[in-house]
Amino acid sequence: MGNTNSVREIEDIPEDNGARFRGKVVPEEILCIIFSFVPAKDLLHSVTLVCKYWHDILTQYHFWFRKLEVERIALSDETKEKLLSLDDERSALYILQGLASRYLPFNRNLIKNPCGADGLKYWKCQHNRNMITVESEPIGSDPIPEEAGLPTQHCFVTSYMISCRTQTFNLKKLGITPVVMDLMKLKIYVCE
């Protein structure tokens, strides 16, 4: 897979193209190494616009697999095979670029205001909303241990009555299309 347009004769590349530096031709392999250390968002929004040659490099699978390695984002062999065998090359490229730029919300908490530092903002409360409150530090119990990795000591508290708070996420709006779900077989963890 990959774009075959990038394999061109050096003579066909104009002098003002990104393949040349001070009159010398920069091999594609060197450009790939350099690009792999550029932030993915810059690659997608700026670098691909420099010239057709750079665009062709940045729309090849092998580059984005390398970029994921540099970013230390591991893909299983099974996922790599699935990506390489996809009939829809644009979807596979979208997934690779999304993983590298971290605009696809993988391996991160999607819950907004998880510890209540902003009160009940982002939370939908059911059953006795007025019975849920936030304490800046737990009252009547031990502080939250540092190993929990929470940014503050804020915590939700409730009385003896049943109450419930929820947040809803639309994965499609977050960029996770049905194709991404089918291919990646995402595991979704929900915990507090």
Image: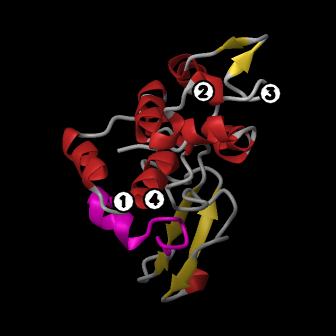
Q: CA distance from mark 1 to mark 4?
A: 34 Å
- Name the N-terminal-most of marks 2 and 1: 2
- Residue at horizontal 59 percent and vertical 46 percent from the top: 153
Question: Does 185 appear above or below 173?
Answer: above
Q: Is 176 contained in the magenta span?
A: yes
Span of residues in magenta? 170-192
Q: Residues within 10 Å of mark 3 (few under 14, many from 20)?
A: few
Residue ID for mark 4: 90
- Residue appearing at x 30%, y 56% in the figure: 184
The mark lying in front, picked from 2 and 1, is 2
Residue 143 visible to the viewer: no
- Density class for disc 1 (Cα within 10 Å; few <14, some 14-19, many ≥20) is few
Task: Pick the residue in front: 176 or 58.
Answer: 58
Q: Residue at x 54, y 82 (%)?
A: 125
Lower sequence index among marks 1 and 4: 4
Q: Which residue is mark 2?
A: 35
Helix, strand or loop at label 2? It is: helix
Secondary structure predominantly adopted by residues drawn in magenta: loop
CA–CA distance in space, label 1 to label 3: 54 Å
